[in-house]
Image (cartoon, grey):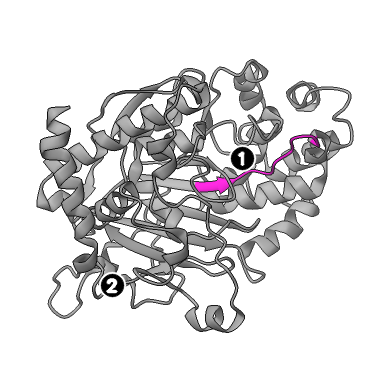
Amino acid sequence: MVEFWENLLPFISIQAQKIESLFLNKRIKILKQQSEGHNVLTKGEICSLLANMFFFTIEKKSIDQKYIQSQIQLTCQTEQKPLQLPKYVNMKNILTRVDGQLENQCNIQKIYCIINYFRRIMMSSEFERQLNVIYKRKLLSNQSIFQDLKNQIQQANLNKFFLQPVQIDEENSIQVYEDKIECIQCDFADKYVGGGVLNKGCVQEEIMFIVSPELIPSILFCERLADNEVVQVSGCEKYCTYKGYGASFEYEDNYISQIQVEQNMQIKLAHYSIYDATNFRNRESDQYQWQYVLRDLQKAYLAFNHIGDTLNISLFQNPQDNQILLSQQYLQQQDNNQLLIAFQKNLPVITGNWGCGLYRGDVQLKLVIQWISASLNNKKVFYCTFGNPLLKNAKQVVTALQGKPLDYIVQLLQNFLLLHKDQEFFEYLLKNSN
C-alpha cells in the first residue's frame, strides 16, 4: 500500500500528463465501420492513454475532438453521424463499483490487474516502452476473396481445400499458448470491442483484456464491428495470471511473458484476433440456418487471416540508408491494404468455444465452422475445449475428418442443418463420415 501511494500513483500521474507531448504531432485514427485502417502506438503511449483512462480524463464526448481524429473527418463533419463507440471509455465504473454485490467483486480483481500493469511499466526499460503495438481493422469488401468463397461454399465446390490438423486441448486456456509458440490468440468479442471490461463484465473477452491491458486502448478508437469486420492486434502481452471465471475471477500473480521481440520492427510477437459471434439467446434454432452459418464462416475466415502472418521487416526500413524508421511514422504514410502482407509465416490459430456461453451457440457446430475457416487459411488449429462435455468426442471427430476436402465437410454440414433437431452434430458426423 505504501508503494502505491509513494511510488506508483505518482508514476501513473506523470504518465497521464505526458499525453500532451506524446500526441502533440500525432493523432490516433478512429477505425471506422466499413473502412480498413490501423494505428501503431508504442507501449509508452499506451501507458499514457491507460493512465488517463485511470483518472477518468478521457471521456466519450471528447474522443474525436482532442487526441483522436476521424479517419474520414470530412464525412463526419458533413453527416454529423455519432461514432459507434462503447459506452464506457474510462475506468470510472471499475474503480467506483466495488461494493459488496457479487457482480462487482470482480472489479476489485480488475483493479489488481491494472495496478500490476502500471507497476510493470514503471519498472520497464526505455527500450521496452518504445516497442510497438499495431491495432488493425480488417474487412471483407464486395471485391474480397470471400465473394468467390461464398459461391464455392454454396456450390460445395471446395475440393482444392482440405481440413487442416486440429489439436484438441481439454486442459489449457487460450493464453497458455502465448509463450509456447507464435500464434493467433482468439478473443470472443462483443460487437463493441472489449465488451464489459470497463464495466462489470468478466468472461472470456473481458479477462483477456484485463490481463493484457494493452488491448484496452482499442476501445477508444474501434467502432462497433459489422458482420464483415474484425480487429486484430499485434505486439501486446499478458501481464497477469488469474483464476476463476465470471464472478469467481481473481487476480493471481504478476506474469513475466517470454514472448520474443522482433528487433527490426520493434514489436513483440504476440497476436490477437478480436471477432464477435452471433447472439442466439432466445433464438437458438436460428444458428442452424445457412445464412447464419455463412456469416460465421466469413467472420472466422477473416479473423484467422491475421496481420501476424504477414509482418514484413522491409516495410520498416529506409531503402536509402537501410536504417530502421519509426514504424508509426512510416505506416501512417501508407494506404496500400497490402502494407503488412508478406507471406512468410502461417501462424496457427488458438481458439475455443466461440459464442457458446451467453450467446448460446452450438459448441460442436462452432468447432467445425472455425475448423473450416482455418482450413481456408491453410492453418493448424489448437482448440481449447474448456472441459465442455459436449466436446468429449472432439478427438474422434477430428481423426475421422482431418485431411478430407472441404466440399465433403461442407456437404455434411448443409445436410445436418436440415436434420439438427434429431441428433447432435458430432453424432451425425461420426455416423456419416467415411
Is residue 204 rendered to the left or right of residue 354? Answer: left
| Image spot of residue 140 (x, y percent) | 60, 63
Of circles 1 and 2, which is in front? Answer: 2
Tags 1 and 2 touching, CB below 8 Å: no
Q: Which residue is mark 1?
A: 370
Residue drawn at the location 31% of the way across and 41% of the way down: 237
Q: Is residue 78 above or below residue 384?
A: below
Quadrant assignment for the C terminus = top right
Q: Which residue is mark 2?
A: 26
Q: Is residue 434 above or below residue 8?
A: above
Is residue 282 rendered to the left or right of residue 302? Answer: right
Q: Is residue 181 above or below residue 227?
A: above
| Image spot of residue 31 (x, y percent) | 48, 65
Between the C-alphas of marks 1 and 2, the distance is 38 Å
Is residue 429 rendered to the left or right of residue 132? Answer: right
| Image spot of residue 277 (x, y percent) | 64, 43
- Give the quadrant of residue 177: top left
Residue drawn at the location 60% of the way across and 19% of the way down: 388
Identify the amino acid type marked 2. Answer: Lys
Q: In terms of secondary structure, what is the magenta stretch mainly?
A: loop
Which region is colored magenta? 274-283
Q: Nearer the viewer, residue 351 or 115?
A: 115
Q: Earlier in the sequence, mark 1 or mark 2?
A: 2
Helix, strand or loop at mark 2: loop
